[in-house]
Image: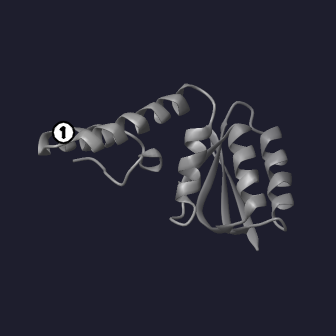
């Protein structure tokens, strides 16, 4: 079962998904997305995935399609957070390119970090990234 709530705000429209995004519920989401997209009028579309607890291959493909269609992926439930991180890194544009580059730099620095100062520096830098796209679990120091 999937429940979709639409919140109209002055600068954005938020779609909050609750439940399971499966091949049976994908048509409901695609229809709701078509309705929302036609009424955006310059506003951002945000998908709140905080209560999406399960998805299958069809759900994964649909989220990938929505992200490439302009929907911004917002908060994600811990079960789907890795998918959101992967989609953020796959996306087009400068932001995704910078995130991919940062992930490579971060991984290389952690492999070579021998002392406390280097790892502390990486944690501070990582703290400037949004939590959803940090390549690790580190945060602001």
Q: Quadrant of residue 92?
A: top right
In front of the other: 95 or 108: 108
Residue 7, above or below 97: below
Q: Is residue 10 visible?
A: no
Which residue lies at the image location 70% right of the left edge and 47% below the top edge? 64
In the rendered view, does 83 fall on the left or right side of 114?
A: right
Q: Residues within 10 Å of mark 1 (few under 14, many from 20)?
A: some
Residue 9 is left or right of residue 65, and the answer is left
Colouring of the image: one colour
Residue sitting at x 54%, y 25%:
94
Q: Residue at x 70, y 30 (%)?
A: 42
Q: Nearer the viewer, residue 119 or 128?
A: 119
**For residue 111, above or below residue 15:** above
From the viewer's perspective, is residue 106 above or below residue 53?
Answer: above
Mark count: 1
- Residue 126 is situated, as x and y percent measured from the top left of the image, at 33, 41
The residue tagged with tag 1: helix, strand or loop? helix
| Residue at x 74% of width, y 60% of height | 57
* Residue 55 in sight in this render: yes
Q: Nearer the viewer, residue 128 or 37?
A: 128
Farthest top residue in view: 94
Residue closest to the far left: 116
Q: Residue 88, percent across and down?
A: 57, 42
Query: In the rendered image, which quarter contains the N terminus?
Result: bottom right
The answer to whether 40 appears left or right of 44 in the picture is right
The x and y percentages for residue 131 are 42, 49
**Residue 72 x %, y %:** 62, 42
Please give the residue where the numbered disc 1 appears in the rendered image: 118
């Amino acid at each position: 079962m999937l429940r979709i709530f639409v919140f109209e705000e002055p600068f954005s429209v938020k779609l909050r998904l609750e439940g399971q995004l499966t091949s049976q519920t994908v048509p409901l989401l695609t229809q709701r997305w078509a309705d929302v997209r036609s009424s955006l009028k310059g506003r951002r579309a945000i998908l709140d995935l905080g209560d999406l607890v399960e998805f299958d291959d069809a759900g994964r493909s649909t989220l990938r399609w929505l992200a490439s269609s302009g929907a911004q992926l917002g908060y994600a439930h811990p079960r789907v957070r890795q998918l959101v991180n992967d989609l953020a890194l796959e996306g087009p544009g400068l932001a995704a390119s910078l995130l991919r580059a940062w992930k490579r730099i971060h991984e290389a620095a952690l492999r070579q970090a021998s002392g406390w100062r280097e790892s502390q520096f990486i944690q501070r830098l990582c703290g400037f990234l949004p939590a959803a796209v940090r390549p690790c679990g580190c945060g602001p120091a």
